[in-house]
Image (cartoon, rainbow, N blue to C red):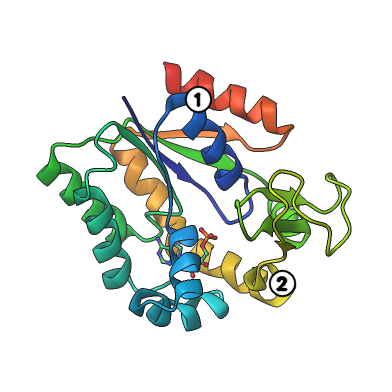
Amino acid sequence: MMNLILFGPPGVGKGTQAKILSHIYHIPHISTGDILRQAIKEGTPLGLKAKSYMDAGNLVPDEVMIGLIKDILTSGQCRNGFILDGFPRTVAQAEALQKNFQGLNLTVHHVINFVVCEKEIVDRLSQRYVCRKCGKIYNFEIDHFKPGDPCFKCGGEIFQRDDDKPETVKKRLEVYHQETEPVKAYYEKLGLLRNIDGIGEIDEITQRLLAVTKK
Ligand code: AMP
């Protein structure tokens, strides 16, 4: 059983690594960003609430996100482990999560902080494309595709997220520094924070994650 939180600014590789670890450990990958994008696509009340915040590069309000994570945790899907990706993003969310865990008799084993310099993040986000159908993440420079090419894995449409466009990326990084970075100290105090170098090949980073999580 492995209960993990992947932490760090947007574009550090949390989503890519969460998908890989989810296969290795057979535990669900819970990405609040993916859940919100799906809700927007389906036009649900959650999606309607979240859209304007996401488009502007802002955080969706805590009460919405805390309610969402509570529903996920109580649904039973995290019973055999989980990888949280994109939650918590504020200290209030982290505190609410700890409370929920206590209520459900769950614990977090590791909070893994991906360390990547700011320039690399901006480059990665501006080159990031995603398959609309299967969620595979592509890098425009590394993966050699042309806009309009189908996904290599499932044939779906590869697109650039609106919030990966340069103006919104800048805003998202500001929001990260102001609202999300303090969460690191919260987990450091609890003795749960593990820093890993987020620069390198995808496989190398997976190996670093396995080394940390197997301890
Ligand atoms: P992500 O895919 O994790 O980069 O998330 C995309 C966007 O979804 C963020 O920029 C926020 O607007 C919103 N979002 C995702 N997770 C959270 C969260 N835990 N708290 C607030 N907003 C969130």
Say which residue appears at 52% left-offset and 39% top-offset: 18
In front: 37, or 58? 37
Badge 1 amino acid: Ile
- Identify residue for label 2: 165
In front: 38, or 208? 38
Callout 2: few (<14), some (14-19), or many (20+) C-alpha neighbours within 10 Å?
some
- Mark positioned earlier in the residue sequence (2 or 1): 1
- Identify residue for label 1: 24
* View extreme (front): residue: 155
At mark 2, the secondary structure is: loop
Nearer the observer: mark 2 or 1; the answer is 1
In the image, residue 133 sits, relative to residue 212, either above or below, namely below
* View extreme (left): residue: 103
Say which residue appears at 16% left-offset and 50% top-offset: 99
Residue 164 screen position, x and y as percent: 68, 67
Is residue 113 visible in the rendered image? The answer is yes
Residue 129 screen position, x and y as percent: 72, 58
Q: Is residue 177 left or right of residue 122?
A: left
In the image, residue 191 sits, relative to residue 93, either above or below, namely above
Is residue 58 visible in the rendered image? The answer is no
Residue 202, quarter of picture: top right
Residue 162 screen position, x and y as percent: 66, 73
Residue 43 screen position, x and y as percent: 44, 79
The answer as to whether callout 2 falls within 8 Å of ligand 1 is no
Badge 2 amino acid: Lys
